[in-house]
Image: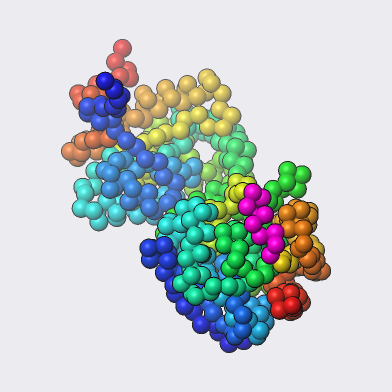
Amino acid sequence: MTSPEARTVAVWRKLVPFRVHVKGQGPAVVFFHGPWGLTWDAFLDALARRFTVYAPEHPGTTPGEPETIQHVQSLWDLVLCYDELLDQLGVSTASFVGHSFGAMVACEVAALRPSRVGKLALLDPIGFWRDDAPVVNWTLVAPAELPKWVFHDPDGAAAKKLFAIPDDREEAALARTRLSWAMGCADKFVWPIPDKGLKRRIHRIEATPTLLMWGEHDRLVPLVYEQEFRRHLTRARVEIVKRAGHAPHLEQAAEAATVVAQFLAG
Amino acid sequence: MNLWPRPIQTPHPPVWVPGSGSISTFDFAVERNVCYCFLSYAGGKAARTMMQGYWDVVAKHGLDANPYRAGFLQLVAVSETDAKAEAEYARHVEYFYHKCLHVPPHWLSPAGNQDYRSLLAANRNPVRRQENTKELRYRDFLEKGYVIAGSPATVRDRLMDDVVKALHVGNLMLLVQIGSMPHELTLKNIDLLAREVLPALRDVWEDEGWENHWWPERLRKPRRDPVGVA
């Protein structure tokens, strides 16, 4: 796996410098990461074999730039920041892939300008709310318990990579801070209830070919939300990934990458 | 004619800002020249690093080290003797630390609650002790400084050494009703505290020439001890 190129693009009157990881050749794919920050992983690397992958870091999660998030005050700001970013990157058309919180953002950015979006792949997206199946508020879960909520196998390599705390004292403090801060930066646009009005806007992307991918054992965003998304995106194709929780692209990277790449290319 | 009510009070009422560990609150208090009050149930002994951090910020801004810039919360229980204090207060102190603090530790600082600098500082140097207070007993709470309890002389010395002097604090917030402590015992605690402990502490900073600018002006001076006058 070679490292992606890291490009910094400042938007929002230059107050919001997005660091974007770029790798690959072919049609553009934009990846919106989830609430625990971005790491370049096997899933993205596999996509980069067939596509030009643009993976921006959510404002505030870029190392050394925590205060950026203060300039993005609402979901509307965030959506417009991404719109400016894609303009500046010269990405006039692209497919969007989003995970969890990032999938909600992908839907919102797509709904702003549907003509920009070729296809949409949503991995365990949030964005709706059902009283009978509440989305688990990951912020109120003990940090040590997070792997159990996010992963089917909390002791597996994917869980360790995302949540492991190093032994070194200073490194551990930095890792805890990074994780907590990344969640805070996402939570700002999510809680108390992750229904921020997507249901009133999602009709704008009902014609966009969409793949809904769900980990079979998602404990955070129960599988019933797959039906919720399909009520609005009636033509969406559904793919359930076995032996995966809330992050199928991390836990079953090869399988998820194959399915997503085929969908995007087809 | 449009009348706007304006909140004007001269002199301006004193402002105290509570903090529980965010280092950015030091800046907030110092930049506005208000009193910073560290609220902790862990006692003076555990607060030294944190309060030193505050005084460092005060010094960095070129302000004087007036002890009245700071407040501190301390749990206190006074009886006639140390042994009697244990007999009277032990179960109430244990009730408080065993049964009244049912908050998951990670809820005290959920993601997004603190600014980045404070979050990093807290992860490097946790404000809260790692120990489980449910496993501690009365004598542990005393030894570790969570609670200052005992005879008037004991409480006086501990307050003076571990809180007033060690933290350089002018404003004490003394928590005198602890856990299951009943009304009558609380009254006794207050009475002994006011009569036999506080008079020895009250003037310690004024004797050094400090004035409490963070106290209502009309109540500052002249000071007449209201206790024991009759």
Determine whether, in the image, residue A265 is placed left or right of residue B201: right
Magenta segment main secondary structure: helix
User: Looking at the picture, does residue A65 appear above or below residue B152?
Assistant: below
Determine whether, in the image, residue B49 is placed left or right of residue A47: left
Question: Residue sitting at 47 percent across and 30 percent down?
Answer: B176
**Residue A123 visible from this viewpoint:** no
Question: Residue sitting at 54 percent across and 48 percent down?
Answer: B108
State the image coordinates of residue A187 (x, y, percent, origin top left): 56, 54
Question: Residue sitting at 59 percent across and 77 percent down?
Answer: A28
Is A248 within the magenta?
no
Determine whether, in the image, residue A40 is placed left or right of residue B55: right
The range drawn in magenta is A198-208
Question: Residue sitting at 27 percent across and 51 percent down?
Answer: B58
State the image quarter where residue B224 is shown: top left
State the image coordinates of residue A188 (x, y, percent, origin top left): 53, 53
State the image coordinates of residue A123 (x, y, percent, origin top left): 70, 65
State the image quarter where residue B227 is shown: top left
Residue occupying the far top of the picture:
B230
State the image coordinates of residue A254 (x, y, percent, origin top left): 74, 79
